[in-house]
Structure formats: structure tokens, C-alpha cells
Amino acid sequence: MRSGHVAVAVVMGLFVASVCSATSVPLGPPVALGPGSLEVEMERNPELASLIARRGYPDWAERVEVDSEPPLDPYEIRVFYLRFDREVAFARASILGRPLIGVRKFDRPIAPADARADRAILSRGRSGGARRARGRPRRCRG
């Protein structure tokens, strides 16, 4: 009986991994997440909460609507760590209609143009307030 449960778990894991490995295409502009909004997302996605517990609070966080197929949510949470030169994206996957699994979509270096803009804005003392995303400043909401 145990081997049947293990087989089902492996098949479900492979299915979610194959769907989640696809690159997502943003549909709209990113929306900045303030501390309160990020806390809500951390409660919804344990994978995101785990990363923040290990690395500390990110320099910037945003929510981006993406073109994704079920079982993934139609948005990603992206966090940026300037000191690590990392951009990490998270989504949630649903099983039987319930969002149960937190998924790390990617973990990559910050694009050079974004990194320069981020450092310029943060050096002015606006670390919780704005990040230049695709040429436009964004205000933090929370």
C-alpha cells in the first residue's frame, strides 16, 4: 500500500514540476508589495516564507500577473536581494482546486539594467518605497 502512495506523490510532483518549469510571460506591470502585503503572501506560500526566513527581508518585492496555466496561480511574487544579486520568483500550485503547494519558479541574477536602477534608488534612502521597474518608478503598497 505504501508504494502506491509513493507512486502517486512522485507522479504529482513530476506533473507540477513540468508545468512549473515553463517560463512565465508577464501580462502587466509589476505591483510593489509593502511589508503587510508581503506578510500575507508569505502566509499563503510557505516556500516564499522559507526563503525570507533564511535570507532575511528582501530589498524589493512585487506581484506580477503572468500568463500561466493551471495548476499555477495567475500571478507570481518576485523578491529581489541586491546584496546577493538575486531575483527569485514564487507561485502557488493547486491540487484538486485548492492552492496547496508553494513553488519556486526561478532564482537568477538580477538583470544588469535593473540592478543599476535598484542601487540608485536604494542609495537615496527609499529602500522600502520604490524600485525602477522597466523604466517606471513603482510605489510600495502595504
Image (cartoon, grey):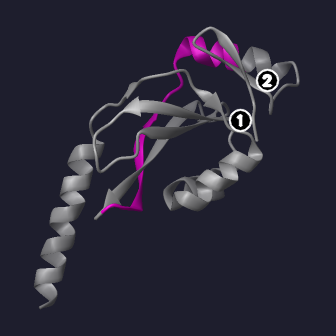
Q: Nearer the viewer, residue 113 or 16?
A: 16
47 vs 137: above or below: below
Q: Quadrant of residue 23?
A: top left
* Residue sitting at x 19%, y 57%: 14
Q: Quadrant of residue 54?
A: bottom right
Visible in this render: residue 54? no
Where in the figure is residue 72, as x and y percent of width and height? 35, 47
Question: Magenta segment, which residues?
Answer: 97-118
Q: Quadrant of residue 42?
A: bottom right
Horizontal placement of 78 versus 95: left or right?
Answer: right
Horizontal placement of 108 versus 62: left or right?
Answer: left
Disc 1 element: loop
* Residue sitting at x 57%, y 12%: 134
Q: Nearer the viewer, residue 69 or 119?
A: 69
Disc 2 element: helix
Visible in this render: residue 82? yes
Q: Is residue 98 magenta?
A: yes
Where in the figure is residue 122, as x and y percent of width and height? 79, 23
- Numbered tag placed on residue 86 in the rendering: none
- Numbered tag placed on residue 59 in the rendering: 1
Q: Which residue is labeled 2 in the image?
A: 122
How many residues crowd around disc 2 within 10 Å: few (fewer than 14), some, or many (20 or more)? some
Where in the figure is residue 8, as x and y percent of width and height? 16, 72
User: Farthest residue toward the front?
Assistant: 97
Are the residues at dot 2 and dot 1 in contact (C-beta closer than 8 Å)? yes
